[in-house]
Image (cartoon, coloured by chain):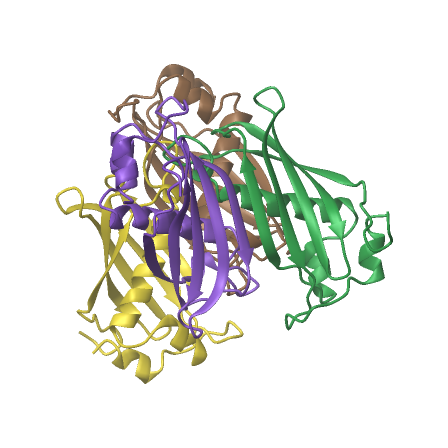
Chain colours: A purple, B brown, C yellow, D green
Amino acid sequence: MSPENPLPQTESIWSHRVYYGETDAMGVVYYANYLHWFEQARNQLLLDCGSSYGQMEEEGLFLPVSEAHCSYLEPARFDQVIAVHSTIEELKRASICFVYRIINRSRGERLITRGWTKHACVDREGRMLRFPQWFRDLFC
Amino acid sequence: MSPENPLPQTESIWSHRVYYGETDAMGVVYYANYLHWFEQARNQLLLDCGSSYGQMEEEGLFLPVSEAHCSYLEPARFDQVIAVHSTIEELKRASICFVYRIINRSRGERLITRGWTKHACVDREGRMLRFPQWFRDLFC
Amino acid sequence: MSPENPLPQTESIWSHRVYYGETDAMGVVYYANYLHWFEQARNQLLLDCGSSYGQMEEEGLFLPVSEAHCSYLEPARFDQVIAVHSTIEELKRASICFVYRIINRSRGERLITRGWTKHACVDREGRMLRFPQWFRDLFC
Amino acid sequence: MSPENPLPQTESIWSHRVYYGETDAMGVVYYANYLHWFEQARNQLLLDCGSSYGQMEEEGLFLPVSEAHCSYLEPARFDQVIAVHSTIEELKRASICFVYRIINRSRGERLITRGWTKHACVDREGRMLRFPQWFRDLFC
């Protein structure tokens, strides 16, 4: 593993009970809402590493999404409890990739969704930025 | 009608086709989504009056919601076309009240929702502001 | 207190960390999202009473919202932790009213929002239903 | 081009004005909301072809999303008018792929987003279904 591309083994888990406002008329969670869960899962990962997205912003570091992907294996339904497992797949000079697996805890811990999001690292004005060392150190 | 409380007769109509992402597992539009429609309807009203919310902000005028109310008379369903009729009910020194009626055009033009939102008029820093004359003139 | 209008003293608390997807370009939580929180808070209240909205539906009991109200006293912002306190204000023959107070735990426990929702009690076909005794007993 | 993989040249355009509820505290449209636009764009495509998703469901045809992808090239902001161009990229026996390009009409018609969604064709019970001929004929 090169220093440019460390793959920290940190895994974070964010749990959630599905509510009506997330479902649609097919009776299942609407496909866009998984991206809301992904955000909450990566916020949790930063908290678990001793920082927070809020703190990053105070330091002038922003992580706008440049790409998102989601594979819907099985639906989630109202009142089910799901757990989003998130890890950092790739940490480059100025971009980061989070990977997510969603487990349905109300249906035998089945894996129901896989996804990932790629983010640029930019300053307040949107200019590309190298990740500072303190950020890299969070995941060691 | 007092100058402090003009009730402009402007009525604006914003039409929309219900999509899956707005419905829930009960098969009807989720109750919070009517507030999204209300925003789009009042944006339309400002456009119809020759301004826009975006232009107001450029002038340093913001209208944060201070109160919202909604009465759900009948549900709206996927693929139905609805029309939100909006008017200004009250225009005070530093607050404004919009009133909304939602008509289901796919079900005999039935009235299905009534609502209103009350907004303060503030500057960029959130300080109370009197509505400027150019704003009042929009509705004459 | 009449048997027709018991006011159970049950109070439930649902906590939540504000994420980006709930905020808007004014930097604060979008006004419709408080209604999402209200739903999650009343789901929590039913769980705390030993039932769940999912279980109610299995029993053929549905609670569509007939009216919703929200007063926005102060905004909530990204990364702040809020707590929604919910109680049952009124339990009539075939309708129920939940009341909500939102506390900003990241800003000195300030009360930032007040709201309520009124729900009808209906069966799967949408016909009015009297609340069964087992439901009333949840709150005693 | 094989009969199994026709690439209909139909392109549909769905236009929309960005409203506050779609933006986040970074001042731009929240990344999950593009998936809401994608749905509305493919609904429009079916309407333009003389059918509708509602009609498909009446015929017992459902198109749950199995995969979604989005590349965010440039942000969209409040009050900007965007146009989602959608086409059918692939129509297999029992799956369909829609491709989307979003143009920012308020910023020199710049391409700001690319995305695609893949859908299975299933019946009311969720069983795989071959697309019927009447559906294929929509795009000829």
Q: Name above or below for residue A85 compared with residue A123.
A: below
Position of residue D77 measured from the top left corner of the image (x, y, whole percent)? 48, 29
Q: Is residue B67 left or right of residue B84?
A: left
Residue at (28, 22) in percent of width and height: B129
Residue D33 is at least partly visible in this image: yes
Residue at (29, 65) in percent of width and height: C44
Extreme residue in the left direction: C108
Name the residue nearer the viewer: D62 or A112. A112
Residue B83 is at least partly visible in this image: no
Q: Is residue A46 left or right of residue C66?
A: left
Total number of numbered discs in the rendering:
0
Position of residue D115 measured from the top left corner of the image (x, y, whole percent)? 61, 41
Name the residue nearer the viewer: D15 or D5. D5
Residue at (28, 79) in percent of width and height: C136
Q: Is residue B90 left or right of residue A110?
A: left
Position of residue D100 measured from the top left corner of the image (x, y, whole percent)? 65, 40
Extreme residue in the bottom direction: C133
